[in-house]
Amino acid sequence: MKTVTFCGHRTLSIAETERLRVRLYAEIEKMIFQGAAEFLLGGYGDFDRLCAKTVKALQAKYPHIKSVLVIPYLNREYNTELYDCTEYPPIEAVPPRYAIVKRNAYMVERAEIVIAYVKYTFGGAWTTLEYAKRRKKTIIVMD
């Protein structure tokens, strides 16, 4: 079973969302055909939400796939309606300001494939993508 994770920007325009929606569906379905069955999602921002909705839509066709919300904090409430379960990485000792960065690194470590939509060379999405490159993960770039 292959595991896929995602990294992308918090804010997407309506045009970007519409363009990415079709492409993401096709890429994720292709990953399912290639053995992907677990999808790790961050749950923050537009790109994460679009990915979660796409995985959820594909579950109607492929009920064996699993959508996992990987949470960075234990003391917060999360909307889990798009996910099958939540997972908390071993980051208890990490200061809260670094929790998301460490959570993102954990998701990259757990995944064989990273689907990325990164336009800027700064911020959390870019940092996560660069980490995935250093870890020599298979990266699918959305453009």
Image: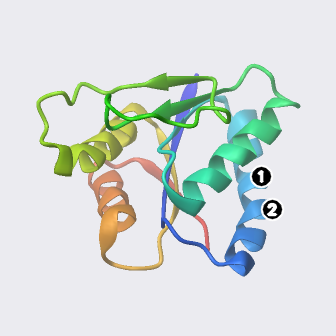
The residue most toward the right is 61
Task: Give the answer, above or below, for where 71 lies relative to 66.
Answer: below
Q: Amino acid at mark 2?
A: Val
- Residue at image position (46%, 37%) is 112
Mark 1 → mark 2, Cα distance in angstroms = 5 Å
Q: Residues within 10 Å of mark 2 (few under 14, many from 20)?
A: few
In the rendered picture of this protein, how many numbered marks are placed on residues? 2
Given contact means CB atoms under 8 Å apart, are the residues at marks 1 and 2 in contact?
yes
Depth check, front residue: 63 or 47:
47
In the image, taking residue 108 as reference, residue 4 lies left or right, namely: right
Residue 85 horizontal side relative to residue 123, left or right: right
Q: Left or right? Give the position of 32 relative to 11.
A: right
In the rendered image, which residue does mark 2 sit on?
22
**Is residue 18 shown above or below 43?**
below
Quadrant of the drawing holding the C terminus:
bottom right
- Provide the secondary structure element on which disc 2 rests: helix
Position above or below: 35 against 113: above
Structural crowding at the residue carrying mark 1, measured as other residues with C-alpha within 10 Å and reported as few (<14), some (14–19) or many (≥20) = some
Residue 111: which quarter of the image? top left
Q: Position of residue 5 (x, y in %)?
A: 50, 43
Looking at the rendered structure, the kind of residue marked 1 is Tyr
Q: For the point 12% across and 42% down, which residue is it?
A: 95
Q: Which circle marks residue 25 in the picture?
A: 1
The quadrant in which the N terminus is found is top right
